[in-house]
Amino acid sequence: MTKFIIKRILVAIPLLLVMSLLTFALMQMTPGNFFDSLRLDPTISEDTLNRYEELYQLDKPVLVQYFYWLKNILKLDFGYSFFYNVPVSRIIADRLFNTFILSLASMLLTWMLAIPLGIWAALHRNKFIDKTLSIFSFMGLSMPSFFLAMLLLYGAAQIGGIPLGGMYSANYDDLPWYGKIIDLLKHLIIPTVVISLGSIASLQRIMRGNFLEVLRQQYILSARAKGLPENRIIYRHALRNAINPLITLFGYELSSLLGGAALIEIVCNWPGLGSLMLTAVRAKDIYLVMSSMLMGGVLLLLGNLIADILLAWSDPRIRYGK
């Protein structure tokens, strides 16, 4: 397993390089740059803009600019955000923590509901509860997330008691420590439900299909013939094999949450990494865009690696050594 992890890390390096090079090239191919908007400001002189371009090598050819950025990345220097006027690392650190909180809450809600609902639907196949869950799953898959967010925000505005956006209340700093936790949980309700609904619907259907397939296997019939308790057959033998495909999907959850949460962060005014990336692209803040895309690639590769490790841990038949 150690050799497998080292090999995957070594393979990830050229993948990240190619992804960053393509991102840098696409940003350079689009017309204009951040300094074009600054040139419209009469309070900023042309000499100041030229000094900025010379300081960050933005007056050099595209490939030379990329290698300067790559050299700084190796020194853990992510560059400077011209839009926010602060180092990129400071912005990424703050926004990454906010996105991590939202992603963690969404993943916990998704997996805590999707797996039990999938098992429940499989054990009551073609019965009322199975058909009801199927209807709700298809509705969750077909409803656009941004539209659901608007509906929940409108409902919260009518009912009251649930914050309509943001991450903290205005009096957050004056609250005690437990009050701050409660305030954060209230702000998490709407974006977490919106992001989780589609994933719950999808994973629940996958879990149902996997569980039905496992229940038809010969070893399940043999376990029942031996007189083993039904709960032991379901939760110890069947569940362990049915959940393996879902563990593989776990690797894509980290990266999909980063991209899928961007629109929800904007609608719900959540200060996360997704909304930051959109702002950076619109402002053509190139170093902030590069760092955000690099973070997304790292999350994707890291999620896949964690999924492979968990898959080998849950299923002893899987070995990566050979």
Image (tube, grey):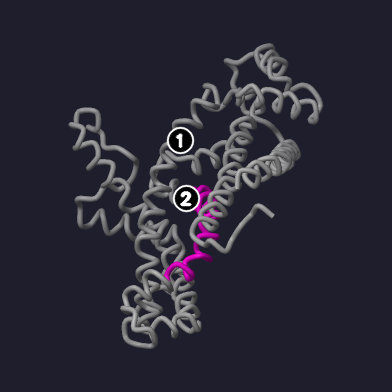
Q: Nearer the viewer, residue 142 or 53?
A: 142
Return the x and y of residue 305 as percentages of the image width and height.
58, 49
Residue, disc 1:
95
Assess disc 2: are there few (<14), some (14-19) or many (≥20) residues with their C-alpha within 10 Å of its C-alpha: many
Residue, disc 2:
261
> Which disc is residue 74 wearing?
none
In the image, is 150 to the left or to the right of 246? left
Q: Nearer the viewer, residue 81 or 258?
A: 258
In the image, is 212 to the left or to the right of 319? left
Residue sitting at x 45%, y 62%: 199
Residue sitting at x 40%, y 48%: 104
Highlighted range, magenta: 239-263
Q: Quadrant of the C terminus?
A: bottom right
**Three-letter amino acid code of the residue under disc 1:** Arg
Residue 198 position by quadrant: bottom left
**Three-letter amino acid code of the residue under disc 2:** Ala
Q: Is residue 252 magenta?
A: yes
Position of 209 relative to 200 (above/below) = below
Residue sitting at x 23%, y 36%: 180
Assess disc 1: are there few (<14), some (14-19) or many (≥20) residues with their C-alpha within 10 Å of its C-alpha: some
Q: Is residue 21 magenta?
A: no
Return the x and y of residue 31 as percentages of the image width and height.
72, 38
Return the x and y of residue 135 as percentages of the image width and height.
39, 78
Mark before the other along the chain sequence, 1 or 2: 1
Return the x and y of residue 173 as percentages of the image width and height.
24, 28
In the image, is 28 to the left or to the right of 129? right
Position of 165 relative to 145 (above/below) = above
Magenta segment, principal secondary structure?
helix
Q: Secondary structure at mark 1?
A: helix
